[in-house]
Image (cartoon, helix red, strand yellow):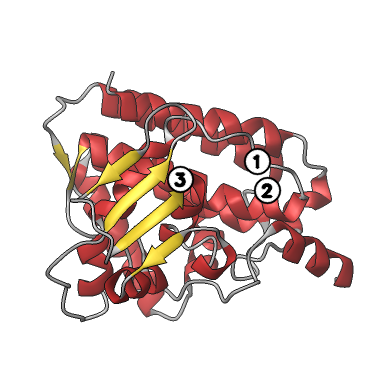
Amino acid sequence: MLQQIADLRDEADELRPLLATLPADGWRRATLFKGWTIDDILQHLHMGDTMALASATDPAAFDALVADIGARRAAGLNRLEETRQRLQGLSGAPLLQRWYATLMQLCDALAAKPPDARLKWVGPGMGVRMFATARQMEVWSHAQAIYDLLGIERPAAAPRLRNIAELGVRTFGWAYRNRGLDVPPTMPYVRLDNPFGPAWEWNPPSRDEAVCGDAVAFCQVVTQTRNVADTTLQVTGDTARHWMSIAQCFAGAPETPPAPGTRHAAASASAARGS
């Protein structure tokens, strides 16, 4: 099995026990991610994994599902409404059980494929490694809003975090093209502190254009779970600063990163007290 598939399993195995502790009314609490509830977040993850499983096992079914979702969206349903209707009210503990079972099926399906196989997606197709990493990134990034809301310190970063950092670096050009902007000719140097060994590094060292510091913080910025201003990352150079202001390692239309001070545990606690 590819390491990235094992890492996807491990990401799910870390989130599932946290969600299993939620009381019935806890699933309806709104997070600081667009006001989505925990139910909304897990429904979104489950639909993503359902689509991914279709892509891995029946490409024609995947095409049909994407077309049906598109038609329902064109008819006026927003993303949350479409997902809620499609899942017919599935929520809470039953949703958790279905999400986890589907994700494990996806991991099995990916493990059965040749490492060089390519799979369809709503954007450009991806190889098995990147496909598994993209799903891991979704679980990891959306889980952050849940940890923030519950005021629970997230477990220490695991080596699998490198997958998400790698994705963040590799989508440098995508962040620009997705916004209709010219891609800068030179990527900044990226050096991230790694608690498991030597620093993770990408691109030639540079004092003029660089992003350096905590690996978790970098992953939070490229997944748009934190504003770079709320991290300790050291960002040097115009290109590096602009990239960190628009970084987006996930597919879809351009998204605006959270405003400074709006996505962290203290902000979630304050919002919860005011609700």
Element assignment for label 2: helix
Whether label 2 touches label 1, CB < 8 Å? yes
Mark 1 vs 3, N-terminal side: 1
State the image quarter where residue 242 is shown. Answer: bottom left
> Disc 3 residue type?
Ala
For the N terminus, the quadrant is top left
Mark 2 vs 1, N-terminal side: 2
- Residue 164 seen by the camera: yes
Element assignment for label 1: loop
State the image quarter where residue 49 is shown. Answer: top left
Which circle, 1 or 3, is nearer the viewer?
3
Q: Which residue is mark 3?
A: 215
Q: Residues within 10 Å of mark 1 (few under 14, many from 20)?
A: few
Q: Which residue is mark 1?
A: 154
How far is the residue under mark 1 from the one under mark 3?
14 Å
> Disc 1 residue type?
Arg
| Vertical order, 100 against 210 (above or below) | above
- Residue 52 seen by the camera: no
| Vertical order, 88 against 112 (above or below) | below
Q: Does residue 45 appear left or right of residue 127 in this picture?
A: right
Camera-side residue of 78 and 123: 123
Mark 2 vs 3, N-terminal side: 2
Give how far across and how far down residue 132 sits, in percent: 32, 37
Give how far across and how far down residue 134 sits, in percent: 34, 46
